[in-house]
Image: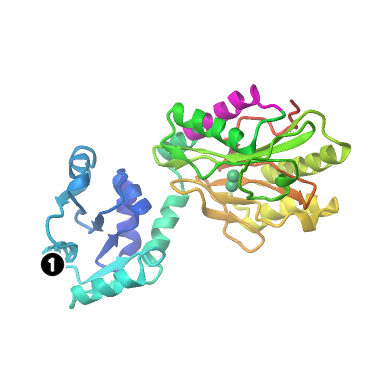
C-alpha cells in the first residue's frame, strides 16, 4: 500500500497538491479496506482516510498506513480542514468516476480551492492498478483456483435435463461455499442455441444430449477477480461443432503464444482473430479478444482491434476468442494470463481441449 501511495504522489507532482479519492474500488486499492463510502486524501506527507461510523471500527483496526478520521459532521468541512492543514490549494479528483454533480458540490462548498478534474488522477490510479504486484497475483490465482474447483465439481454432475440456471447455481454455490467473497459477475451458463449469444442470460432452458454448454464465470478473493470460459459438450458433438471448437482453440493457442511484454493489445487480438478469419468465420467473432482483470472484472490492458496499449510485465489479460453461429451454437474459450519478463504465465490450469461428457 505504501508503495502505491508513493507512486501516486510521484505521478501527481507538479500538477496537484493532493489527491481526493472517492471511488469505491480505488479507495479499496489504497486502503486495503472494502467500504461503500469514505474519502481518501493523499498528501505528500501523509494519507488520510475520512470514513463514517459504519466503518470506523474496521478502519481503525485494519488500515495501518493512513490516519483514520471519523466523519462526524459534513464531508466538505472535513475535506476543507485537511486541505487547509496541509496548505493544499489544488486537489486532483477522479474524472472517470466522480459525478459532475459531486464535482460542482465540491467547488461550491470549497471556494478558494481548485479541483483538477482532467484524467491525471484516474489515469495514474489505473496505470498503477494495471501492473499487479506479487500479492495481488496471489489473490487472483486463489480466485481462479476456486473457479476451477467449481468447474471440476460441476463436470461430475453435468447432465442432459439440467437447466441453465441450475448449472449457474452449482458454480455459484460452490465458489461461495468455498470462500469466494463474491462472484466476478453474474455467471453465464448457456446451452444449445443459446450459446451463440456471447453474453446470454441463463434461463430455464434444459440441456439436451449433444448440446454445447458454455460457462463464463469467476470468483472474487480479497477483492480480486478471476475470469474463465469453458464450452463443453454433453454427449456427442456434431462434426461442425468439433470443427468450430478446434478453430477457436487454435485461435486461443495462437494468442497465448503471442502474449508477451511489448506486444500491443491490437496485435494480441489479431493473433487470435487472424486464425478465425482465415478459417472463414471472421464475421462470427464480434468482441475483443481480451481485457485486464483485477479489482474489477474489466480493467486495462484491453486487447481489441482498437487498442494499441503495450503489454508489460505484471499485466493480467484474458484471451477469449469465440465463434458464434446465430440460431445454431457458439464456442468461447477463455483463459487469462500474467505477462512476465519473458512471456506469460497462464493463470488458467484447466486445459482448453474439448471436454465431452
Ligand atoms: Zn469471462
Ligand atoms: Zn473475460
Q: Residue furthest top?
A: 156
Front residue of this view, candidates 224 and 306: 224
Which is the main secondary structure of the residues drawn in magenta?
helix
Which quadrant of the figure has residue 205? Answer: top right
Q: Quadrant of the N terminus?
A: top left
Crowd around label 1: few <14 · some 14–19 · many ≥20 (10 Å): few
Q: Is residue 157 magenta?
A: yes
Left or right side of 189 for 312: left
Looking at the image, how many numbered discs can be counted on the residues? 1
Residue 219 drawn at (x, y percent): 49, 37
Is residue 207 depicted above or below 16 in this figure? Answer: above
Q: Is residue 313 magenta?
A: no
Q: Quadrant of the C terminus?
A: top right
Residue 258 drawn at (x, y percent): 68, 46
Q: Is mark 1 within 8 Å of ligand 2?
A: no
Residue 44 drawn at (x, y percent): 23, 58
Q: Residue at x 82, y 33 (%)?
A: 237
Q: Residue at x 63, y 64 (%)?
A: 306
Front residue of this view, candidates 320 and 7: 320
Residue under label 1? 84
Quadrant of picture, ligand 1: top right
Instruction: Give the residues drawn in magenta, as a range.
Output: 142-159
Amino acid at each position: 500500500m505504501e508503495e502505491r501511495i508513493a507512486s501516486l504522489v510521484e505521478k501527481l507532482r507538479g500538477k496537484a497538491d493532493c489527491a481526493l479519492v472517492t471511488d469505491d474500488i480505488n479507495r479499496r486499492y489504497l486502503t486495503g479496506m472494502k467500504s461503500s463510502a469514505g474519502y481518501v486524501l493523499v498528501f505528500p506527507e501523509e494519507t488520510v482516510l475520512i470514513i463514517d461510523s459504519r466503518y470506523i471500527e474496521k478502519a481503525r483496526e485494519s488500515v495501518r498506513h493512513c490516519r483514520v478520521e471519523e466523519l462526524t459532521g459534513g464531508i466538505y468541512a472535513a475535506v476543507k480542514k485537511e486541505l487547509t492543514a496541509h496548505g493544499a490549494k489544488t486537489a486532483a479528483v477522479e474524472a472517470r468516476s466522480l459525478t459532475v454533480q459531486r464535482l460542482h458540490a465540491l467547488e461550491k462548498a470549497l471556494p478558494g480551492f481548485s479541483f483538477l478534474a482532467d484524467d491525471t488522477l484516474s489515469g495514474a490510479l489505473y496505470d498503477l492498478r494495471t501492473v499487479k504486484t506479487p500479492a495481488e497475483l496471489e489473490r487472483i490465482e486463489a480466485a481462479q483456483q476456486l473457479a476451477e474447483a467449481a468447474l471440476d465439481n460441476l463436470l461430475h454432475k453435468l447432465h442432459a435435463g439440467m437447466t441453465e440456471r441450475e448449472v449457474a447455481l452449482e458454480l455459484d454455490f460452490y465458489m461461495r461455499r468455498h470462500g469466494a467473497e463474491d462472484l466476478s459477475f453474474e455467471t453465464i451458463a448457456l446451452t444449445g442455441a443459446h450459446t451463440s449469444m456471447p453474453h446470454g442470460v441463463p434461463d430455464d432452458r434444459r440441456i439436451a444430449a449433444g448440446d454445447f454448454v458454455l460457462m463464463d464465470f469467476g470468483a472474487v478473493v480479497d477483492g480480486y477477480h478471476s475470469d474463465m470460459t469453458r464450452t463443453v459438450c454433453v454427449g456427442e458433438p456434431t462434426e461442425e461443432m468439433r470443427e468450430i471448437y478446434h478453430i477457436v482453440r487454435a485461435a486461443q493457442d495462437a494468442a497465448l503464444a503471442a502474449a508477451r511484454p511489448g506486444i500491443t493489445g491490437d496485435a494480441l487480438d489479431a493473433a487470435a482473430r487472424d486464425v478465425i478469419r482465415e478459417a472463414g468465420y471472421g464475421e462470427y467473432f464480434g468482441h475483443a479478444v481480451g481485457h485486464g482483470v483485477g479489482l474489477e472484472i474489466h480493467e486495462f490492458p484491453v486487447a481489441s482491434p482498437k487498442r494499441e496499449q503495450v503489454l508489460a510485465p505484471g499485466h493480467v489479460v484474458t484471451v477469449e476468442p469465440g465463434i458464434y453461429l446465430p440460431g445454431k451454437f457458439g464456442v468461447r474459450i477463455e483463459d487469462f494470463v500474467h505477462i512476465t519478463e519473458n512471456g506469460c504465465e497462464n493463470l488458467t490450469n484447466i486445459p482448453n481441449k474439448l471436454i465431452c461428457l
